[in-house]
Image: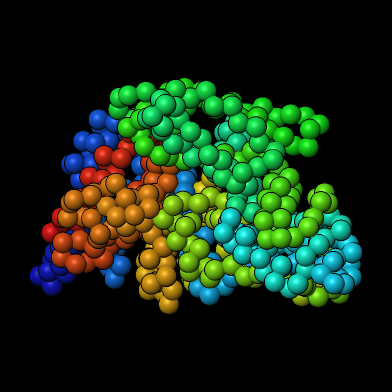
Amino acid sequence: MISLKSKLRAVLSFLLALTTLAALSVWPADIPDAVRQALKQASIPETAIGIYVKEVSGKQPVLAVNSDTAMNPASVMKLVTTYAGLELLGPAYNWRTEIYALGKIKDGVLRGDLAIKGYGDPNLNLENFWLLVRQIRQTGLKEITGDLLLDNSYYNVAVGDPGAFDGNRYKTYNVFPEAVLVNYRTSALHLIPQAENNTVRIVVDPASELLDLKNNLKLIRGNCGDWSNQLHVEVREQQGDNGRITVILSGNYAMQCGQNTYHLSLHENSAYVHDLFKKLWRQQGGSFSGSVRNGVVPNGIAPLKVHHSPPLAQIIRGINKFSNNVAARQLYLALGETMMPSNGHTSVSLEQSDQAIRRWLLAKRLSFPELIMENGSGLSRQERISASQMGELLVAAFHSQVMPEFISSLAIAGMDGTMRNRFRGTLVAGRAHMKTGTLNEVTAIAGYLQDHKDRRNVVVFFINHLQAANARSAMDALIRWVYERA
């Protein structure tokens, strides 16, 4: 016969089990109806998504759906790279570019080559390269009798085919990292409607002696639409002609589009830097008629000038707000500096960067066994991370000493960056700091959302599916649900 005490103990154990199950059922809650409906309309199965929502001070997630499944996050992977950069390198970290005179200077004349040794500055744009050239002139140097030598030896990374990823070799997002990289090797084609003569004017910036442009664009009336996809761009490389490129633009361009810019990466790195350096040097009164070559600066020579990039805290705003792939890849390589041995080895590799990330995560007690990082930018078919791992990384970032710099680098809903046109005019505008990501068959979003009760939430939503491009309404529905939740 069972005693009354034993019966009470059994009842209490049963009630405790029910309570535990009820508590557990709170956090892996069902998908909100609005999200489920949007997924259904987009023909995306729930097995193709990963969701993780958690208050930054919460113990358990508010919502978790397939959250432990490793998925391709596209450009959302930049959150891992930039947070690691802020902690491992510091918000004030900057890249340097060194200038060397490989010869004697007398009366403003360099009898020898001028060398540029790079360390991967991701912000050596037109303005900053102009400043660098001006700084060289301010040393009193006026004439260079030799060549321009580019030292890219700081990167132990193979420069492959830029079209290997998706066949678009002239797209600027496919530019490979290089230790001396100026303006991302980009040519900006400014399209300007000319109503007075019914034409479209094209201005190339920077102007280049290596570029021949044929303008066959037709100015039309009507709605603008997706103007860039209405252009037909043909690129012809002229073999054996010092890297000359012919670009032919055809198609229609609507007057209502106003002025826009189409970006291309057309030239090899050495040719691009050489062409631009000659132009800027001569504009500032210098004399130079030499060629360009790649090489290594000899040891034991003091630089003539050292140029420093803006601090990392400023550069990551371009990486996250506008999803700059090339800058993200150069930051990822910079992480490898923390793994450099003290035996005189002076180049960084992708392997060192991967080791640095994993050692950093281990020190933070973040276990991410499924994490795969190829280049740190998300422009990859191999990179993987789960929604819960990304969510917990964002929670850790919120409680870190670099939280202000990190969050301020994210696009603000309805205001700027890649979130500029999302949630504009709604209650969510200004309350969500997010990073978006898009590849073929991949759509992702992750970041922070302050809900209507002023609770700060981490929100992660990954979709890997053939119809992922149609997922925006489902993602927006999740963000609205988090904002409005009780």
User: Residue 106 location in percent, x, y?
Assistant: 87, 72
Quick check: 389 left or right of 448? right
Q: Please tell me which residue is depicted at 71% across the width and 58% down the height of the picture.
A: 281
Residue closer to the observer: 202 or 180 = 202
Q: Residue furthest left?
A: 4
Q: Height in image: 110 above or below 468? A: below
Q: For residue 466, what is the image quadrant? A: top left
Q: For residue 409, what is the image quadrant? A: bottom left
Q: Height in image: 53 above or below 170? A: below
Q: Please tell me which residue is depicted at 79% across the width and 55% down the height of the picture.
A: 288
Residue closer to the observer: 163 or 111 = 111
Q: Please tell me which residue is depicted at 38% across the width and 29% down the height of the picture.
A: 196
Quadrant housing the C terminus: bottom left
Q: For residue 44, what is the image quadrant? A: top left
User: Residue 269 location in percent, x, y?
Assistant: 70, 47
Residue 91 visible (yes or no)? yes
User: Residue 348 location in percent, x, y?
Assistant: 71, 62
Indicate how the structure is coloured in the image.
rainbow
Residue 441 visible (yes or no)? no
Q: Height in image: 261 above or below 154? A: above
